[in-house]
Structure formats: C-alpha cells, structure tokens
C-alpha cells in the first residue's frame, strides 16, 4: 500500500520468522503492510482481520495479487475467541489507531481538520465519540481522560466538557480540540511539544472503541490458537496496552506478573518462553522516517506447550 509504512517491519519479520507452508494471522490488518511482508517472506498463507470497512476494500488489492495465500475477514479481533478449531504458526497484533484512520480527517480521530467527532474504528457499530461524550457519566469521562489518556490536566478538561455538553454540546473535532485548549493553562500549552488535545483525543478514542478490553480478550484467544513452537507478536503504542501484553506474556512464561506476585515457582505453569528480556523499540532511523514508531513496543513469545 503506497504511503503506508508498517512499524518495526524488519524486527517483526525476524521474530515471526515466516516459513513455507505456514499459516499466520495478522490481527490488525490496517493498511496491509505487515501482511505483505509476511507473504513476501515465505510461501505461506496469511489470514488478516480488521473491523474497519475501509480496510476490507484495501484488502481486495492484496487478494488479487496473492490469491488463495491471503484471506481477509471483517471482524473485531476480540471475536477470535469464537473461531474454534483453527490454529496458526504465528500471530501479529499492531494495536491502536491506524495511519489510514488518522489521515482520513472525516473519520474524526484527529484534530488537524474539521470533521464530525466520530472516532469509531468500525463506523457501522457503537456510539460515535460525540454521542459517547453526550451520554458519559463524569466517572466515564475521568476514566477516559485521566486513566486512558494519562492527561494531568484532566480535572479542568472534564469540567469543561461537562459544562459544554449541558449547553450546546460537542459535535466536531475542532469543537473538542478548542475546548481542551481553552481548559489548558498557558504554562502547560507552551511547555509541551504536543497539541493540548492530544491525550484527551487518545483517551476518548480508547473508551469509544473499548480498546483495552478487546486486547484482554484477543491475546488469550490468539495464544489458545497458536501452535506449539509458534510465535505471538504484539506491537503496543500506549503504556496501558503494553502493560496488558506484558502481564499475559509473563503469566504464560511462568514469570511474576507484577511486583506483588510472590507465588512460588511450583505454582506457575510454563506454557511459553519470552523472546527477549525487553520489548523491541524503533531505532533513530525509523523514528526519523516514521515518527509514529517512536512509542512502539514489540513483545514476542514462543509457545512451548
């Protein structure tokens, strides 16, 4: 796909190590960059899934080039738990919003242009961000902006949203961005290198798409369908995403899942081995060419039983 740059491409390919005759799943198809890398690396098959209807249209082009070596399924990766019986030699997840979704201003993910405040990865299901904000409780807003967005100025922003929605409401990306900016003190605006609304948009997007819950569902479902010796790769862009992946991986590897996990080793079952002690991150060259890769963390494990 022209213009689409898959994050940590070489590192992912090295860890996944596609082989002839293997079957792999790309759990977050997006623009198809990682899918094509896998298909070009070996005479294998890739099953790709994505809930975005526009991703389905992009997949048609790849299907024409690779024939029956490629299969696309329009579904949320949380539905993997329902696909019983299938097993795979490797799984790949690339969490978060895709570059296509960000670049398509009308999707409402970005504050770089005027658009309806939508943010849904599947615009045919669920509540738009505008409707979510209109119905959200104060606790929902705090969880989204403070916890998911990790926004320090959350109190003023939540108050501003609550006051505004009780009046004219918030219907567009620019309305939300301008509101957040107006709630952000000048000392914070001028000290930060990012737009004041960045973290608020991120937190609301995560809430609208229930992103963390579907990760908690999808990763175990993928592990269940992974063949012995197969590799599960996950690329995260947010600390909360990475925390979920890290905890699950350490559980399957028989490692402590957190600081307070003091269980003796004989109470742990080793079902997998971690590949690498730390997550793989992008180098300076990739970051300069693709700034989105700056926050990417790639974790991988191999199933042993």
Image: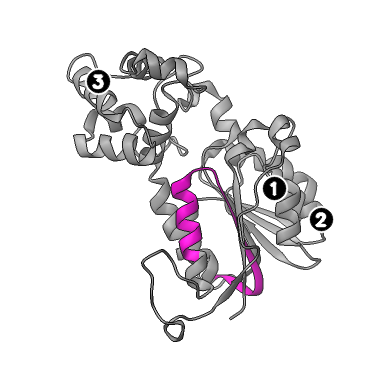
- Which residue corresponds to mark 3? 160
Q: Position of residue 177 (x, y in %)?
A: 39, 18
- Whether residue 274 sits left or right of residue 128 in the image: it is right
The residue located at (45%, 25%) in the rendering is 108
Q: Position of residue 68 (x, y in %)?
A: 74, 57
Task: Decide: is 101 above or below 19.
Answer: above
Span highlighted in magenta in the image: 225-248
Q: Which element is circle 2 on?
A: helix
- Which residue corresponds to mark 1? 34
Q: Position of residue 155 (x, y in %)?
A: 25, 28
State the image quarter where residue 59 is shown: top right
- Which residue corresponds to mark 2? 41
The residue located at (73%, 52%) in the rendering is 11
Q: Which element is circle 1 on?
A: helix
Answer yes or no: do the residues labelled 2 and 3 have beta carbons within 8 Å?
no
Q: Which element is circle 3 on?
A: helix
Q: Which color scheme is applied?
A: one colour
Q: Name the one closer to the observer, 87 or 279.
A: 279
Mark 2 or mark 1: whose residue is earlier in sequence: 1
Q: Is residue 244 magenta?
A: yes
Residue extending furthest toward the bottom: 266
Task: Classify mark 1: residues with Cα within 10 Å, few (<14), some (14-19) or many (20+).
Answer: many
Mark 2 or mark 3: whose residue is earlier in sequence: 2
The residue located at (40%, 64%) in the rendering is 259
Mark 1 or mark 3: whose residue is earlier in sequence: 1
Foreground tag (1 vs 3): 3
Residue 106 visible within the image: yes
Residue 79 visible within the image: no
Foreground tag (2 vs 3): 3
Marks 2/3: CA distance?
A: 51 Å
Marks 1/3: CA distance?
A: 40 Å
Q: Is residue 55 magenta?
A: no
């Amino acid at each position: 796909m022209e213009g689409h740059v898959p994050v940590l491409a070489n590192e992912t390919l090295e860890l996944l190590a596609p082989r002839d005759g293997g079957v792999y799943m790309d759990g977050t198809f997006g623009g198809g960059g990682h899918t094509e890398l896998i298909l070009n690396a070996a005479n294998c098959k890739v099953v790709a899934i994505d809930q975005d209807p526009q991703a389905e249209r992009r997949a048609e082009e790849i299907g024409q080039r690779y024939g029956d070596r490629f299969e696309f399924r329009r579904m949320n990766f949380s539905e993997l738990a329902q696909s019983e019986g299938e097993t795979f030699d490797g799984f790949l997840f690339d969490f978060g919003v895709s570059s296509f979704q960000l670049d398509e201003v009308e999707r409402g993910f970005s504050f770089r242009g005027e658009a309806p405040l939508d943010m849904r990865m599947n615009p045919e299901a669920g509540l738009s961000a505008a409707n979510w904000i209109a119905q959200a409780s104060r606790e929902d807003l705090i969880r989204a902006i403070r916890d998911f967005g990790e926004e320090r100025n959350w109190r003023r922003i939540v108050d501003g949203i609550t006051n505004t929605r009780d009046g004219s409401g918030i219907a567009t990306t620019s309305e939300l961005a301008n509101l957040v900016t107006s709630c952000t003190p000048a000392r914070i605006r001028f000290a930060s290198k990012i737009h004041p609304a960045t973290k608020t948009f991120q937190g609301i997007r995560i809430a609208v798409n229930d992103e963390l819950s579907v990760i908690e569902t999808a990763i175990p479902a993928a592990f269940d369908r992974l063949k012995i010796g197969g590799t599960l790769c996950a690329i995260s862009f947010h600390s909360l995403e990475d925390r979920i992946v890290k905890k699950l991986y350490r559980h399957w590897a028989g490692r402590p899942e957190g600081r307070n996990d003091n269980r003796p080793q004989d109470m742990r079952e080793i079902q997998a081995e971690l590949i690498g002690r730390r997550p793989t991150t992008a180098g300076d060259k990739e970051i300069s060419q693709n700034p989105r890769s700056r926050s990417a963390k790639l974790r991988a494990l191999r199933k042993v039983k």
